[in-house]
Every structure is written in C-alpha cells, then in structure tokens.
Amino acid sequence: MAQQIQPEASAAGAPAAGPKQRSTRVVLMALMIAMLLAMLDNMIVGTAMPTIVGDLGGMAHLSWVVTAYTLATAASTPIWGKLGDMYGRKGAFLSSIVVFLAGSALSGMAQGMGQLIGFRAIQGLGAGGLIVGVMAIIGELIPPRERGKYQGMMAGVMGIAMIGGPLVGGSITDHLGWRWSFYINLPLGAVALAMVTAVLHLPKKKSKPKIDYLGTVLLTIGITSIVLVTTWGGTEYAWGSARIMELIALGVASLVGFFFVETKAAEPIVPLHIFRSRNFSLMATIAFITGFVMFGAVLFLPLYQQSVQGASATNSGLLLLPMLLSMTVVSLFAGRVTTSTGRYKAFPIVGSVLMVTGLYLLSTMDTGTTRLTSGLYMAVLGAGMGCLLQITMLVAQNSVEMKDIGVGSSTSTLARTLGSSFGVAIMGALFNSRVQDEMTARGGAGVTQASAQLDAASLAKLPVPLREAYQHAVSSGTHGAFVLGAAVALGAVLASLFVKEVPLRGAGPKPSDAAPSTAPADASAPAEVAPAPVESAGGSAPADVESAPSPTVRERV
C-alpha cells in the first residue's frame, strides 16, 4: 500500500524513515507535473494556433482561444484558493486537475472555433486551481523555513515551460496534429492525479461554512472586466472607446461592491483581514510588479531577437536561456540561504534592484547590440526575478494564518496574473505606438505591421532601406517598453524596503534551547507574529513560532 504523507509530526517527534521521505518526493513530483501542465499549455497551444485556424476556420475569433483560457484562469484562481480552505486542499486540487483534463480532452475533440473557445474556458477553470493548489499544499506540508529548498524546482518548471513549450508545441503539431497539443495533457495529468490520490493525505474539513455567492459573482465580474480591458484595449478597441470605458466602469463598480460585501460576509471569498499584514500587502504589490515585468520581457525579447538580431522563431526561444537559467539558479540559491539562515529580507531588495538594472540595460539595446551582450543583460534581469518569484509567495504564506493559506496563495497568484495582463497591454501599447511613429518618420509606413511582428524570413524579403527602417523601429519600441518596465519596477524597490523580517514558521530554536522572543510586535501584522493553529479533523495544533516551532519536513512526513 502506498505510503501516505501527513502534514503533522508524529507524537514522538522522531525523524521519519526513508520510505516517508520518498513519499514526500513523490508528492512534490506530482505537484510539479500539475504546475507544469498549467504553465505549459498556453505555450504549446500558441505554436499550434496557425494550424488550428487552418483546420477549424474562424480567424476573426482567434484571440478568444487564448482570452477565454486566461479569463477563466484569472477569475477562478481566488475561488479555488477559498474552496481549499473551506473543504480541504486535496479535494479541491484533485477537482481542478479533473476539470483541466476534461477541458483538454474536449478541446482536442472540438469541431469548430466556437466549441474550442468554450472548451478552453473549461480548461482555464481547472488551470486556475492547479498553481494555487500546488502552492497551498506545499504551504501546508512544509514549514516556510524548509520551503526554500524547493524554490529552484518551481523556478525550473517555469523555465522548462517557457523554453520547451514552443518546441514541444511545434513538434507535436508537425508530427501528430494540433489536437495532440491538448491530448498531451491527459497522460501527464493522469500521472499527477494517481500520484496525489495515492500518497497525499491532508486533514479533512468538517465544518460547513456558508459560501459567499455574492462576493464570488462580484469578484468574477471585476476580474473579467479588468482582463478584457487589458486584452482588448488598443487592439480590438481604442483605449478611449465606449466599450473600454464601459468595461472599466463595470470593473470598478464590481470591485467596490465586492470590498463592501466582503466586510459583511460570514465566510468571505477573500478575507480582507489578510491585507492588514504589512508583509502580505507588500508581497502582493511586488508579485504584481514582477508579473508586469516578466511577461512583458518574455513577449518583447523574442520579437527583438527575430526582427533586429535575425533569429528564427525557435532560436529566439532558446536565446531566452540566459534569463531563465539565471532565474532558476538564483532562485535555488535564495531558497537554500533562506532555509539555512531563516533570513530573507535582502532578497526582495536585491531582486528588485537587479530587476530595475536589467530592464534599464535591455532598454539600451539597439540595432548593433550583439547576442552576447543582450544575453548578459537578460541574465541580470533573470537574477532579479529569481530573487523575487518564490520569495514573494513564501513571505505571503508566512504572513497569514494557516486556515487562510489557500486564499493567501491565490491572492498572491492573482496579483501576478493581473500584473502580467497589465504589463502586456501597457508595454504593448507603448511598443506599437513607438514602432508606428518610427516607421512613419523613416518613410516605412507602407509595411503592414499592425502588431509589429514580421519574422526573420519575411524581413529578409524586404528592400534594404525598408528592412533597416523596421529594425530601427522595433529597437525604438523595445527601448520604450523596457524603460516603462524599469520605471514600474522601481515600485518593487520601494515596497521591498518596508518588508519586515518576521521569523519563518518552523525557524524557531530547538525545544531544549527555546527562549522567550524579543522581537518587537508588529501591530499591522498579527498573523505574522502569532499564526493561528492549523485546523484539522482532530482539532487544532498550535503553531506559535517562538514557543513551539513547527516540525521540519522530515518530522512532518
């Protein structure tokens, strides 16, 4: 029978035996597979889109294949987090995997663009629970002090998705057909489903809380409006158009109503008291800015490499390796240092400074910048993001009570998702404006480049003067986008300076060496100083950091 993994220590508190350590690795492997599914999907499908349109038609609705998935993911993220807190994380996580796999299977069987869009929305609903479920389960199984060891794994999964997605998507589409871009999720998801079911055991929730239906509806409308504004603004509709203004008004009204409802709800979908923690609010802000910067960089760097440096679509993905490898290595280093010392405040500060520096360096690139130079600049940006990506989640989870770790994880994830939507929209609008202005000034306005995406092969066919004009225009556009990114990233530097280094749960002294805490209390962050007990089926276990330190990972399993 499969060994099950428990979040509590044994009564004797003795270190676990080898089989239990192996079960921990099995669970983490399953969680990483689930996380990979959510991150990899859009990368693979994006490569297959031209083939999908050629088969199903519906070019006018092409953008909705991605938009439906993104909307459903963003809107469902906080709901999955709350469901895990109310009814148990294992059940919510397994449900999200099943929904994602059902959406994947249906998408692969779609017979028209309308069906594909609807099935992608179902897939997105499941994806909203995958990353949140991974983060929340790790947060419940592993104390923050020990969690840093696994940061490199999560950063590595992100790197694999960004680099491997286009390569895998192209290969699958060419050799198996576009439908396998969705079917490939089924065996991977089935493995994750079986592994989690067999070895993960978490306390079941026996309470029957009231569901905050009104808050859920208002939050969903608000998030949907925001994502549509950032998706449609400057592309489908002008920023000042009536449709965009209506969406902005609807979004603002819904979110204002949501915040009012949450103050009255018996079981709010997002408990507003978590924002009383200074650290949690600061981490949500930094997560938003990191998403803004990271996805903007991932969008414009390949475009610059293809248009200005002459890289192919495949090579431009591989040329992101300096940023992604740097991000993974630094994230692993930050996690190890955090685990061994219990100190983490330096990483948000150093990371945000490196992020600003990397963006500024990228903004200096022009038509003469070599691939080696741009690679070094990307490595600086990657190092900054490596300091921030997982540390923000770790500190956010450490800043809320265990009973709220699901909504804490989902709120931080949602902040990063919304940041990426705003980053792509605002940086994209500035980029396109700069490109069009530069082309007009250089007499190259005749080039059809509504979204400024001529690949290297198309550029080679242009007359030399027109090609050079376009390359200068793209260089100017990326300069403006990265300058904007650097300006926004300064907000992360400011926010990181106010982070208070609260001891991580599980970082206290051994019981024999325990001593009264001398750390000053922070009235703005009661949850950070004295986390609430972990609620389980059999009662509650105190989690006071100073007097009764949480068990280590080995003790927990």
Image (cartoon, rainbow, N blue to C red):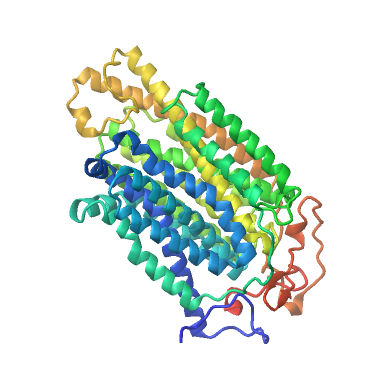
- Is residue 185 placed above or below 219 in the rendered structure? below
> Could you say which is closer to the camera, residue 419 or residue 338?
419
Counting labels gives 0
Quarter of the image holding residue 176? bottom left
> Could you say which is closer to the camera, residue 154 or residue 496?
154
- Is residue 221 placed above or below 127 in the rendered structure? above
User: In what quadrant of the picture does the C terminus appear?
Assistant: bottom right
> Could you say which is closer to the camera, residue 196 or residue 327?
196
Which residue is located at x 23 percent, y 33 percent?
456
Which residue is located at x 26 percent, y 20 percent?
447
Tell me: 39 left or right of 445. Answer: right
Residue 137 in percent (x, y) is at 56, 66
Tell me: 89 left or right of 512. Answer: left
Decide if residue 504 is in sight here. Answer: no
Tell me: 394 left or right of 482. Answer: right
Residue 331 in percent (x, y) is at 50, 56
- Is residue 301 placed above or below 387 in the rendered structure? above
> Could you say which is closer to the camera, residue 389 or residue 172?
172
Residue 387 in percent (x, y) is at 54, 51
- Is residue 375 placed above or below 10 in the rendered structure? above
Tell me: 222 left or right of 61. Answer: right
Residue 348 in percent (x, y) is at 60, 48
Quarter of the image holding residue 101? bottom left
Decide if residue 166 is in sight here. Answer: yes
Which residue is located at x 79 percent, y 53 percent?
522
